[in-house]
Amino acid sequence: MLGKKVFCLSALAILSSIGVLRAQTAVDSVSQVEARKVKYLSGLQKVNSVKELHYADSITNAKNVSEADIICLSKEYQKVHRYEFANLIDQSDYKLTTDTYVDSNSVIRVKVARAATKEEQTKAIEEFRKVVFAVTPESIEREKIIASQMNKPAPSFSVVDVDGVKYDLQELKGKVVVLNFWFIGCAPCKKEMPELNKLVEKYKSKNVVFLAFEVNDNTPGKIKAVTEGHFNYTMIPAKRNGISVQYKIKTYPTSYVIDQSGIIRFGLAAYNPFRLPEMDKTIETLLSH
């Protein structure tokens, strides 16, 4: 009995020690974050309005301060590369926003990622909705091209993917074929990839083929290196003066859904996450027939 008591007390002591260590680690982490915050933001002022931000931008440009000169920080005030910072914000689904800090001359010196409030998220989504649905000469041209292709046979193609597997549209009849035209370095293309991956996952056991044409004439090896784990369509190396011309592609990304008979049933030119559910619904409807 005494042995059991000693064991229990020892176990409690160990657990208590672990708890103390965890608490200490948490405290250290908070103090480290605070130290980094002081290090990077000391002597700077936060920009508090759109008007102030526009003014700071103009002063920063006038002083020939480049983006590379501005320090970018994560939520934990860890220094990150500006491209990584932009990707962090872009891929957050509006959950993150940017706080901008200026020096006494109103020159932008630091940008910090911060969790967006519900109001900020709603505002950002509505502002983006206005942008993607804005009627411009370019958007009118895109829509005319898509409209002219609807319910007509899709241009034929016979291509080879990055692993040497052949895909011929004629041989794919009987399947729903989803196409995406994109290129490495296209920011909007990258932004829509997570949503496109969800479609691949949803229909992975169905009679659907997802093909992505990378149109910058990159090697299969480079395309695989860039997309592995990030874009789950089957990758097709292509050229802009090739299949893109056949499909009259003017904007990237552009997507099509082709039915089991080879007829185009859906088209979407330019990144527009608000219309991706339509593409999903089109696939779903075609599979139910």
Image (spheres, grey):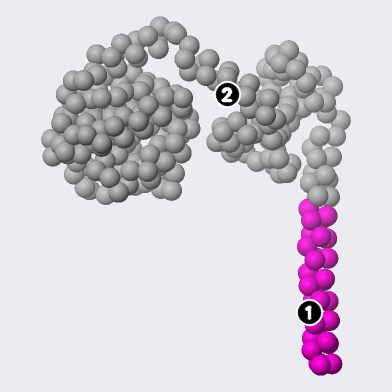
On-image quarter of the N terminus: bottom right
For marks 2 and 1 on the same chain, the one whose residue lies earlier in the sequence: 1
Q: Is residue 19 left or right of residue 216?
A: right
**Left of 248 or right of it: where is 3?**
right
Task: Decide if residue 189 is in sight here.
Answer: yes
Distance, label 2 to label 1, CA atoms, is: 52 Å
Does the segment drawn in magenta span residue 117?
no
* Mark carried by residue 122: none
In screen coordinates, is 280 left or right of 164?
Answer: right
- The residue that disc 1 covers is 11
Tell me where the magenta segment starts and ends, as one range: 1-29
Hey, which residue is sitting farthest top in the picture? 137
The residue tagged 2 is 125
Q: Residue at x 46, y 39 (%)?
A: 194
Q: Residue at x 79, y 86 (%)?
A: 7
Residue with the most extreme right position: 43
Image location of residue 24, percent across then percent down: 83, 60
Q: Residue at x 55, y 20 (%)?
A: 128
Q: Amino acid at mark 2?
A: Ile
Query: How many marks do you count on the picture?
Result: 2
Please, is residue 121 above or below residue 13 in the view? above
